Amino acid sequence: MKRVLTQLLNLLNVVVESSLKGGLVLFLSVSKNTKSAICPQCGKKSEHLHQNQNYLVKDLPMGDKEVILNVNRRRFKCKICRKTFNEKLDFIGARKTYTHRYTENIVKQLISSNVSNLAENNGLTDEEVNSILEDIAKNLLPINLKNLRS
Ligand SMILES: [Zn+2]
């Protein structure tokens, strides 16, 4: 475990296992330090690790480096339900490729900017920024924005 990087990352119950620098990008392999996960079906704790699955999500930059997390989302098997399930990662939304705090930071910047500036400053495309904004709007508003555009 990388103690200093884990402290710098500062995500609850998440540890940095290893790091890799590639140009202006810092890749951090992270996983939760908990030994168990809660089964979404029956609510019982499972410690039976079934599979490790990795995927990449973008996090806040550190210094001049863009940070990509190589997240180990573990699959557990519930002995009661006899089914496998993914552990819940509370710092990333379901099926998202950005951390929650990355998304929050984009919104803060948008308040004093516009979509094109924001995309350029963060190495994103306009479409990616719009997609982040739509995700936020979906979580905030109980209506589907697409229904409003006709
Ligand atoms: Zn279960």
Image (cartoon, rainbow, N blue to C red):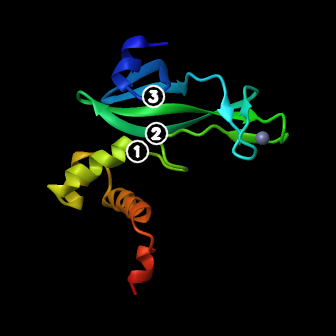
Please tell me how crowded label 3 is: few (under 14), some (14-19), or many (20+) other residues with Cα within 10 Å.
few
Name the quarter where the C terminus is drawn: bottom left
Residue 91 is tagged as: 2
The one of 128 and 112 positioned closer to us in this rendering = 112
How far apart marks 1 and 2 lie (CA) works out to 6 Å
Q: Is residue 22 left or right of residue 35?
A: left
Q: Could you say whether the residue bearing mark 1 is in a helix, strand or loop?
A: helix
Q: Position of residue 21 (x, y in %)?
A: 38, 22
- The disc, 1 or 3, on the residue closer to the chain's N-terminal end is 3
Return the residue at label 1: 100
The one of 25 and 36 positioned closer to us in this rendering = 36
Question: Is disc 3 in contact with disc 2, using a CB cutoff of under 8 Å?
Answer: yes
| Mark 3 C-beta to ligand 1 under 8 Å | no
Q: Position of residue 52 (x, y in %)?
A: 67, 30
Q: Position of residue 114 (x, y in %)?
A: 19, 60
Q: Amino acid at mark 3?
A: Leu
Question: Is disc 1 in contact with disc 2, using a CB cutoff of under 8 Å?
Answer: yes
- The disc, 3 or 2, on the residue closer to the chain's N-terminal end is 3
How far apart marks 3 and 2 lie (CA) works out to 8 Å
Q: Is residue 10 left or right of residue 85?
A: left
Q: Amino acid at mark 2?
A: Phe
Residue 66 is tagged as: none
* Quadrant hosting residue 146: bottom left
Residue 12 is tagged as: 3
Q: Could you say whether the residue bearing mark 2 is in a helix, strand or loop?
A: loop
How far apart marks 1 and 3 lie (CA) works out to 13 Å
The furthest residue to the front? 43
Please tell me how crowded label 1 is: few (under 14), some (14-19), or many (20+) other residues with Cα within 10 Å.
some
